[in-house]
Amino acid sequence: YRLNDDGTIATTFTFRQGGFEGQQKIYRPTGFVVDQESYAVWDMQFFWPFKADYRIVFVNPDYSQTIIGRLKRDYVWIMARTPRLPEEDYQHLLKIIATQGYDLSKIQRVPQRWEAGQN
């Protein structure tokens, strides 16, 4: 994430479609801060004119882990700056997710593989 001069947020999502050997996909949506007090509620625009609800549910003090959710509680993401999350941290984040009203039975832990040379 990077704050743009106009107040929008430049974002980059990189993933491999279908698994580790799948084609690499890169999305660069623009974030728009909706709540100017907390800065925790954004709209994300992957393509014009549609914007998606995007809420920062939690961020740890060093910004290395965060939980992103939606008001409808239909999606939630755990994001980290490292590909491997210590189990203790993962369990702590799950507890936070549960207190926010998300159904933990629907959480899927996605395998991660970080390729050499990536930042």
Image (spheres, helix red, strand yellow):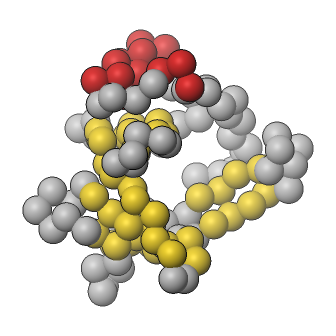
* Residue 54 visible here: yes
Q: Residue at x 28, y 24 (%)?
A: 99
Where is residue 38, by image quadrant?
bottom left
Q: Residue at x 85, y 56 (%)?
A: 23
* Residue 2 visible here: no
Image x and y of residue 49, in percent: 51, 83
- Left/right of residue 66 with respect to residue 81 in the rendered view: left
Quadrant, the N terminus: bottom left
**Badge count:** 0
Image x and y of residue 24, in percent: 79, 57
The residue furthest front is 72
Q: Residue at x 33, y 63 (%)?
A: 42
Q: Is residue 3 above or below residue 101?
A: below
Image x and y of residue 27, in percent: 63, 66
Image x and y of residue 83, in percent: 59, 35
Where is residue 68, by image quadrant?
top left
- Left/right of residue 118 with respect to residue 32 in the rendered view: right
The residue furthest left is 37
Where is residue 60, by image quadrant?
top left
- Left/right of residue 7 with respect to residue 75 in the rendered view: left
Q: Is residue 90 above or below residue 10?
A: above
